[in-house]
């Protein structure tokens, strides 16, 4: 059963709008659970806002990375009904691709990279 307050919509439009709303809810779930915005320990309102903004930026950067992939990452839990990959699949692929390089935050000696690999990857994507 579908419920709407707009009685001028067709059944197909109601289903389309409801599907779009579900994608928005899935996006919030990704930000809260996959990126970690629900686990913040901040209490200051500005810190909470900043943390949420960084989580949203991390999500956007991950999806931008996915848009530039030649092939979709493999699904961890594949089904016959769903062909799209999940955010977690994309995040896993990004971590694998950057795994050898690290994030440039370790305190290495002479082998320490002169450039943060994550930032370099993001800059290549947006350039």
Image (cartoon, grey):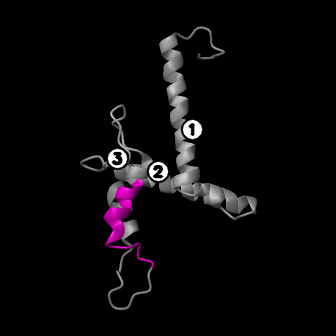
Whole-percent x, y for residue 66 in the image: 35, 49
36 left or right, relative to 101: right
Question: Is residue 127 visible to us here?
Answer: no
Residue 98 lies in the magenta-colored region: yes
- Residue 76 position within the rendered picture, expressed as x and y whole percent measured from the top left: 37, 49
Is residue 46 shown to the viewer in this render? yes
Frontmost residue, 26 versus 77: 77
Q: Which residue is mark 1?
A: 25
Tell me the residue that label 3 is attached to.
75
Disc on the earlier residue, 1 or 2: 1
Quadrant of the frame with the N terminus:
top right
Which is more N-terminal, label 3 or label 1?
A: 1
Which residue is disc 2 drawn over?
Answer: 60
Q: Is residue 113 above or below residue 118?
A: below
- Residue that protrudes farthest toward the bottom in the picture: 109
> In what quadrant of the picture does the C terminus appear?
bottom left
Residue 79 x %, y %: 35, 37
Q: Residues within 10 Å of mark 1 (few under 14, many from 20)?
A: few
Q: Name the secondary structure under disc 2.
A: helix
Q: Are marks 2 and 3 in contact (CB under 8 Å)?
A: no
How would you rate the neighbour count of disc 3 (Cα within 10 Å): few for under 14, some for 14-19, many for 20 or more? some
Quadrant in which residue 91 is drawn: bottom left
Q: Which residues are magenta?
A: 91-105
Front disc: 1 or 3: 3
Mark with earlier residue (2, 3) = 2
């Amino acid at each position: 059963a579908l419920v709407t307050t707009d009685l001028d919509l067709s059944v197909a439009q109601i289903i389309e709008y409801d599907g779009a709303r579900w994608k928005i809810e899935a996006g919030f779930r990704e930000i809260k659970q996959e990126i970690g915005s629900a686990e913040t320990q901040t209490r200051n309102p500005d810190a909470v806002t900043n943390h949420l903004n960084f989580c949203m930026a991390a999500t956007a950067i991950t999806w931008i990375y996915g848009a530039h992939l030649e092939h979709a990452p493999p699904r961890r839990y594949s089904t016959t009904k769903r062909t799209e990959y999940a955010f977690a699949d994309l995040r896993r692929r990004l971590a694998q691709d950057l795994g050898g390089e690290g994030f440039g935050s370790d305190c290495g000696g002479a082998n320490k990279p002169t450039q943060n690999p994550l930032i370099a990857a993001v800059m290549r994507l947006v350039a």
